[in-house]
């Protein structure tokens, strides 16, 4: 019954893998770059994964409030795309928009190497981090965050 969203989908690999893993009620991915959305569509067709792709700005998603049960995305690290300064304004806007479109019992799963900034942003915007997994991505330390909106307490696992 999951309605899964990757609001910063790039070429779509995360969402395609999720759709291939188990059935979903709906899968939607989008990116600000038209070329990325086009490539995501090609990748999904090649994998025979049913996903709706859209070009958008993830800070203002054209989706109804509380319409998604899962958000899974790779945030800009601020290295190859964007910068640490960009993340200082981008991350709070994303945290608010993700909160708006995620259902009350939904889960947010994100990946970033700007983990201190994302931790602070989530905490300041009412998210509860339920799990952290530290790993290395292309030689850079990164963290997978699992967060929700309804838990009363926050726990951290490394």
Image (cartoon, grey):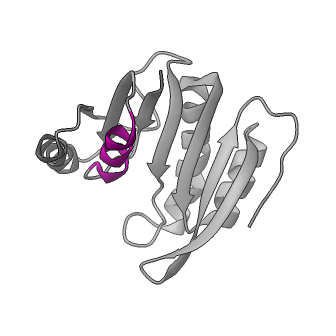
Residue at position x 38%, y 43% in the image = 21
Instruction: Inspect the magenta stretch and tell me whether residue 117 lies in it.
Output: no
Residue at the front extreme of this rendering: 22
Can residue 96 be seen in this snapshot?
no
**Left or right side of 79 for 36:** left
Residue 11 appears at what percent x and percent y?
25, 52
Residue at the bottom extreme of this rendering: 139
Q: Is residue 66 above or below residue 135?
A: above
**Left or right side of 69 for 6:** left
Q: Is residue 56 above or below residue 12?
A: above
- The picture quadrant where one finds residue 148 is top right
How many numbered callouts?
0
Residue 118 appears at what percent x and percent y?
65, 56
Instruction: Inspect the magenta stretch and tell me whether residue 21 lies in it.
Output: yes
Most frequent secondary structure within the magenta stretch: helix
**Left or right side of 142 for 44:** left
Can residue 11 be seen in this snapshot?
yes
Quadrant location, the C terminus: bottom right
Query: Residue 44 or 53: which is nearer the viewer?
Result: 44
Magenta segment range? 12-22
């Amino acid at each position: 019954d999951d309605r899964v969203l990757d609001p910063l989908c790039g070429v779509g690999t995360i969402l395609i893998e999720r759709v291939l893993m188990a059935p979903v009620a709906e899968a939607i991915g989008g990116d600000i770059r038209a070329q990325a959305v086009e490539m995501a569509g090609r990748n999904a067709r090649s994998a025979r994964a049913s996903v709706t792709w859209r070009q958008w700005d993830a800070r203002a998603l054209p989706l109804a409030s509380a319409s998604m049960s899962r958000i899974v995305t790779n945030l800009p690290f601020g290295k190859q795309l964007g910068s640490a300064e960009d993340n200082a304004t981008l991350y709070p806007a994303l945290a608010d928009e993700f909160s708006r479109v995620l259902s009350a019992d939904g889960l947010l799963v994100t990946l970033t190497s700007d983990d201190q900034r994302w931790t602070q942003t989530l905490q300041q915007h009412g998210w509860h981090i339920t799990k952290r997994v530290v790993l290395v991505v292309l030689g850079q330390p990164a963290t997978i965050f699992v967060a929700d909106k309804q838990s009363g307490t926050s726990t951290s696992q490394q």
